[in-house]
Amino acid sequence: MRRLLIVDDLPLFRVGIGSALAAADFEVVGEATTAQDAVEKARELQPDVVLLDILMPGGSGLEVVGEIISVSPGSKVMLLTASESEEDLLIGVKAGARAYLTKDTPLPDLIAAIDAVAAGGAVLSPTMAGKLLDVTNQLLRHEELLQARKPTLTGREIEVLELVAQGNTSREIGDLLFISENTVKNHIRNILDKLGLHSRNEAVLYAVREDLITI
């Protein structure tokens, strides 16, 4: 019997999904309502699979994926969330999550995914699989150009990009770095020109993939 830890700040969701999975012969060994609580419960309970939400008060589930794996090496982390963000997907996969499913996943598919992940597989919901393919194809299209141009970002540009990845606006970045908002915008424009990309999100995805920034 698969032993599950359910992490979500919504009581109705935890109860509902827990009851449904218990009826499908899974053992729900615990629940957690925050990211840090998830780490402690994982350490204590050593579940086979952790169903982890991303969007929770007091900290994102993405921030503790690695910690959960560290304190409970036998646990497989599955992100089960309302977020369909490409950035969240890439960060979660990089941190070690074995699945990324949206909360509208049908119960039979969720059950199959838990079994697959517990057995060592990896699963993405169709929406997120499509996004991952889009991002991968986009990056591959740029690969030849990037290799030819060998773009090099300055220390300041990487600093700006890291703050962009954290969700800061141009004005907020300017305040943090003690430079003007226009200067920040110029840095971002230079970053996009160097990388041959078209948006901040694309630049962040590239920087995460290339280990230029830490989130």
Image (spheres, rainbow, N blue to C red):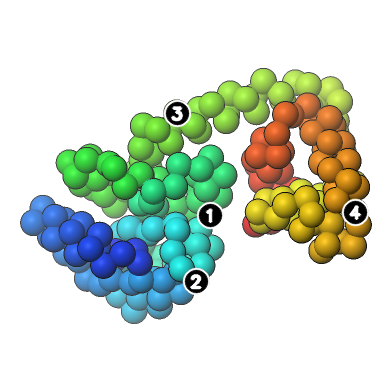
In the rendered image, which quarter contains the N terminus? bottom left
**Crowd rating for badge 2 (residues with CA inside 10 Å; few <14, some 14–19, many 20+):** few
Q: What is the three-letter code of the residue carrying label 1?
A: Ala
Relative placement, left or right, of 134 versus 173 is: left
In the depicted structure, whether residue 136 falls above or below residue 5: above
Q: Residue at x 91, y 47 (%)?
A: 183
Q: Residue at x 74, y 29 (%)?
A: 197
Quarter-of-image position of residue 194: top right
Q: Which residue is mark 4?
A: 180
In the rendered structure, which disc, 3 or 4, sits on the residue that comes first in sequence? 3
Where residue 172 is drawn, which disc sits there? none
In the rendered structure, which disc, 1 or 3, sits on the residue that comes first in sequence? 1
Q: Residue at x 25, y 72 (%)?
A: 30
In the rendered structure, which disc, 1 or 4, sits on the residue that comes first in sequence? 1
Q: Which residue is mark 3?
A: 130
Q: Which residue is mark 2?
A: 58
In the rendered structure, which disc, 2 or 4, sits on the residue that comes first in sequence? 2
Q: What is the three-letter code of the residue carrying label 2?
A: Gly
Q: Confirm whether residue 155 shows in the render.
A: no
Q: Which residue is mark 1?
A: 95
Q: CA distance from mark 3 to mark 4?
A: 38 Å
